[in-house]
Image: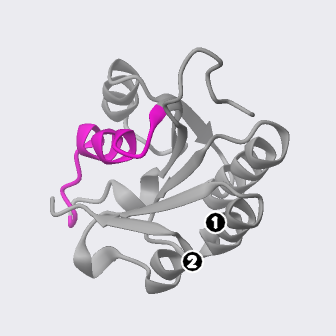
Amino acid sequence: MGLRSLLSNTPTAALFVDGPNVLRDEFDVDLDDVRDAADEAGRLVVTRLYLDEHAPSGLIQAAEARGYEVTITSGDVDVKLAVDATALLVEDPPDVFVIASRDTDFKPVVELANRRGVRTLAIAPGEHGRSDALRNAAQDAVVLDG
């Protein structure tokens, strides 16, 4: 049953946001819009934003105020996000795995979720910022129009 609530038939969802690839000036993405898109897939039980050590403190504070668990990494954000997402999918999978990114590097994580029977949703920050490979690997896809 994983993260599904014993008291509810509402599917659970885990949102992982690749901050450096989504929160770029060129996309003008709002974290509330990302969360709202993920919330359509199920009740959010994990809402994580991954950033590098150069992230402005104002962004970190704004994300935390919006209910995101912020993970700052001094190394490659992609690696930390992929490892954390894989661990969740193996140990305590949600009903829906949601990845907000434009990076094809997350395709193997989406494929793992699919193999484990977890529904998948890819959120792209904009039409010109989407990854066709990620979109095609996921069962569902949403493009934010900024």
* Disc marking residue 85: none
Q: Amino acid at mark 2?
A: Ala
Q: Residue at x 75, y 34 (%)?
A: 1
- Spatial distance from mark 2 to mark 1, Cα to Cα? 6 Å
34, above or below 12, in the image: below
Q: Which residues are magenta?
A: 26-43
Q: Amino acid at mark 1?
A: Val
Q: Is residue 34 magenta?
A: yes
Q: Between residues 2 and 62, which one lies in front from this camera angle? A: 2
Find residue 79 and report its image quarter.
bottom right
Element type at marker 2?
A: helix
Q: Residue at x 61, y 44 (%)?
A: 95
Left or right: 119, with 145 as reference point: right
Q: Residue at x 31, y 27 (%)?
A: 62
Q: Which residue is mark 1?
A: 110
Q: Residue furthest right?
A: 91
137, above or below 34, in the image: below
Q: Are marks 2 and 1 in contact (CB under 8 Å)?
A: yes
* Disc marking residue 137: 2
Residue 29 position within the rendered picture, expressed as x and y whole percent measured from the top left: 23, 53
Residue 104 position within the rendered picture, expressed as x and y whole percent measured from the top left: 56, 77
Element type at marker 1?
A: helix
Q: Residue at x 53, y 40 (%)?
A: 13
93, above or below 98, in the image: above
Point out the tag, 2 or 1, that comes first from the N-terminus.
1
